[in-house]
Amino acid sequence: MNKNNNKTQIYLPIAFSLVLIAGMWLGSLLVSNKKISNTILPIGNQSYNKLGDALDYIVQDYVDTVDLTTLETDAIRGMLEKLDPHSVYITKEEFHEVNDPLLGSFEGIGISFRIEKDTITVINPIPGGPSEKVGLMAGDRIVKIDDTLVAGIGITNNKAIRKLKGNKGTKVKVSNYRRGVPKLIDFTITRDVIPTFSLDVAYMVDDSIGYIKLNKFSATTYDEFKEAAGQLKDKGMTKLILDLRGNPGGLLQAAINISDEFLKDGKLIVYTEGKNRSRRHAFATKAGDLEQIDVAVLIDESSASASEIVAGALQDNDKGLIIGRRSFGKGLVQEQINLPDGSAIRLTVSRYYTPTGRSIQQHYENGDAEGYYEEHYHRYINGEMKNKDSIHFDDSLKYITPGGKIVYGGGGIMPDIFVPLITDSIHTYYNLLANKGLIFQFAFDYTDKHRARLNKFTDFETFNRKFNMDNNTFNELVAYADEKGIKSDDHKIQISKEKIANLFKAFVGRNVLDEKGFYPIYHSVDTTFNRAVYEIRNLN
C-alpha cells in the first residue's frame, strides 16, 4: 500500500476527533436553560467564601497588575475541567456562538461561506434571507465589511462570523468581488433572524424507502423531522433510513420527541437520574406517526448524546435496526445556568439511561478531556473500526431487551449490524485525493468557473441526468493533483477514475443544490448506507 495513504489513514481518526470536539462544544450537551437568581446561597449556609477572598487578595496585593475577569474565568474553568469533560464555562463573548446552534436560529445576514484563498467566499445565500433579498450570489467574494478590508489579511471563520452576525434590524455594508464584474459591488444588508437547519436532506431512495439525515438536535429538529417524514410518507414511504452518523447530539427533548414517533404508547424512551436530581422518565405517547414504519438508524463513532438516546430507545424496544459502528458514548446530562454578566455555566447534573437501564457513558479520567476525545484514535489503533471482534464488553454491563437481544452499557451503543471502516488498498489514488481535500477543492473551483451554466440546474433529477465529469475535466483534475504533489501511474489513476468522478459530481451538486445535490450521488459509494438499504428491504 502507498506509504502516504497509510499516513492518511492513521491521521484520519485524529481528524475525526477534532471534528467531534467542535461538534460537542456546539451541540452535544443536553441543556435545559435555568435562570439564576441574583444571589447564590453559600453551600451549607457557610458565609466564608475562600475563593472570593483569594481573588480579592491577588487583585489587591499581587506585585503586578492583574485582570479580575481573567482570573475568575480561569478559576471557574479550572474547577469545571476537574469534574468531567462536559461541564464547561461559557464567557459572555462565546455565549451566542455556543447557544445559537441549539436554538435553531441566529441573527445575521444569512449566508453559508468558507474562507477560500484568504477571502470570505459565499457558498450560497440562505433562501429568503436578507443577503439573497439584496442580491448576494453564490461565488461572491466579500472584500470589505463596513469599508474595512477583510480579504488577504488572514481572517478566520470565527472573526468573519462576528463581523457578519448582529442584532436583528442592524445594518452592515459588504463590498463584493464578483467574477466578470470589474468593480466591487456594494450591498447594505439589514440583519434578520436566520434559521439554522438540523435536517441536511430527506429524499426517497426508491418507491418505498425514505432517507433522512440529521446533523444535530436543536429546538427546531423535531418539527423539521416531522415535516420531512410526512412528505416522504405521502410519496409512499413504508421504510426509513435515519442517518445519525456524525451527529454530536443536542437537546434531550428533541431526541425524546423523535423517538416517540416510532414507539407505541407507554414505551419507555429514556430516564435520567443524578445525586441531586430525582429520577425522571420519558415515555412514548399516542402521537407516533411512524410506529408502522420499518426503520434503520445509522450511527458511527461520532454519533453522541441525543443521537445515542434515539438509537438506544429504538434498540432497547426492539424497534428496527441499528447499523454502523459503535457510537461515541456520552451519557451525561448538562443544565445551563445563565450568570448576571452574560456568561453561563453548563454543569453535568445527571446521567441518562436507556430503557433496559444501560448507561452508555464511556470511561473518563477527571480532568483528562484530551484523552477522552482521543477515543476515536484508540478505537482505530486497537482495530475496532475494522473488526467488531476487537470490541470487548464487560459481562457485568450486559442487558437483555424484551425481545431477547443482548445489549451492553459502558461505552456507546453497539449496532445490531456492524459495518467496518473501509481501508481501501486498491483505490489508493482516489484515497489520497479525497483525504487531502483535492477533489473538494477542484470541484469548488470548477463550480466557480462554470457557475452561469451550472445555475441552470434547478432540480436534482435534471442535474443527475445531465451532468457528469467528462474526460477533459478528469485530466484537468489529474494535472491539478500533480501540481499539489500527488503523482501516480496511469493504471492506478484509471482504477480510481469512477470513484473520483462520482465524488466530484457530488461536490458540484452540493455547490449548486446544497445537500440534496450531494447525498443521493455520494450514497452510491457509501457502504453503510448501501448495507442499510439491503437490510431494510429484507426486514420482516
Image (cartoon, rainbow, N blue to C red):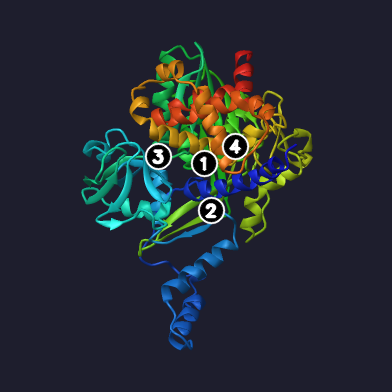
Amino acid carrying mark 2 in the image: Val
N-terminal label among 3 and 2: 3
Q: Please, is residue 311 above or below residue 411 in the view? A: above
Disc 3 vs disc 2: Cβ atoms closer than 8 Å? no
Q: Quadrant of residue 60?
A: bottom left
Which residue position is annotated with label 3?
Answer: 219
**Residue 230 appears left or right of 134:** right
What residue sits 32% from the left and 39% below the top?
A: 179
Q: Residues within 10 Å of mark 1 (few under 14, many from 20)?
A: many
Which percent across, then down, holds residue 463? 42, 20
How far is disc 4 from disc 1 in space, using C-alphas?
Answer: 30 Å
Disc 4 vs disc 1: Cβ atoms closer than 8 Å? no
N-terminal label among 4 and 1: 1
Which percent across, then down, holds residue 347? 51, 56
Q: Residues within 10 Å of mark 4 (few under 14, many from 20)?
A: many
On the question of residue 264 being in view, the answer is: no
Specify the label residue 249 is tagged with.
Answer: 1
Of tags 2 and 4, the one toward the viewer is 4
Which residue position is annotated with label 2?
Answer: 349
How far is disc 4 from disc 3 in space, using C-alphas?
Answer: 38 Å
Amino acid carrying mark 4 in the image: Leu
Quarter of the picture holding the N terminus: top right
N-terminal label among 2 and 4: 2
How far is disc 1 from disc 3 in space, using C-alphas?
Answer: 12 Å
Which residue position is annotated with label 4?
Answer: 433
What secondary structure is found at the residue carrying circle 3?
loop
